[in-house]
């Protein structure tokens, strides 16, 4: 079971002082789930995974979580960038067209 993410309520800025410069979200807090632009989905081959956690380290959205037995990807927040698949030393993450 993936740990629950906190959804932040989005309020558009009403003046210049409310504009964010740099990162506007806290780590692990996203304003919305995947907006539907992902074209590739990462699939983990759990049988070949050595659980080195490099995919977890390099995932820019923090979508990969370790359960008792496997690694799981939270597809609600995954953007399909493929960084996890690129960094996997055993190449057990494949990017599959949605």
Image: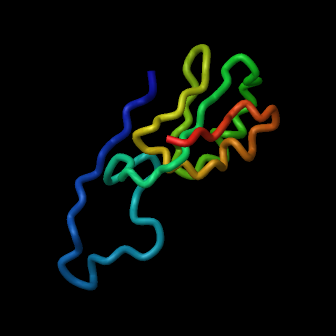
> Residue 62 vs residue 14: left or right?
right
Residue 41 quadrant: top right
Q: Residue at x 44, y 46 (%)?
A: 28
In this view, 72 is above or below 36: above
- Residue 47 picture location, percent across and down: 71, 17
State the residue lying farthest toward the bottom: 16
Quick check: 2 above or below 10? above
Please name the colour scheme applied to the rendered image.
rainbow
Tell me what residue is drawn at x 35 percent, y 46 percent.
Answer: 33
Q: Position of residue 6 (x, y in %)?
A: 33, 42
Q: Is residue 64 left or right of residue 32?
A: right
Task: Please indicate whether residue 55 sits to the left or right of residue 96 in the image.
Answer: right
Q: Residue at x 75, y 45 (%)?
A: 87
Q: Residue furthest front?
A: 97
Quadrant into which the N terminus falls: top left
Query: Eyeballing the image, is 13 above or below 6?
Result: below
Farthest residue, direction right:
89
Residues 82 and 54: in front is: 82
Quarter assignment of residue 52:
top right
- Looking at the rendered structure, the number of numbered marks drawn on it comes to 0
* Residue 92, image x, y percentages: 73, 30
Q: Nearer the viewer, residue 22 or 35?
A: 35
* 58 up-or-down from 44: above or below: below
């Amino acid at each position: 079971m993936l740990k629950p993410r906190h959804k932040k309520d989005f309020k558009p800025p009403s003046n210049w002082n409310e504009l964010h410069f740099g990162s506007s979200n806290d780590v692990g807090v996203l304003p919305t789930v995947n907006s539907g632009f992902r074209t590739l989905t990462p699939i983990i081959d759990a049988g070949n995974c050595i659980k080195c956690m490099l995919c977890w380290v390099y995932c820019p959205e923090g979508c990969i979580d370790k359960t008792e037995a496997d690694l799981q990807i939270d597809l609600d927040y995954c953007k399909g960038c493929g960084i996890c698949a690129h960094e996997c030393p055993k190449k057990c993450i494949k990017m599959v067209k949605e």
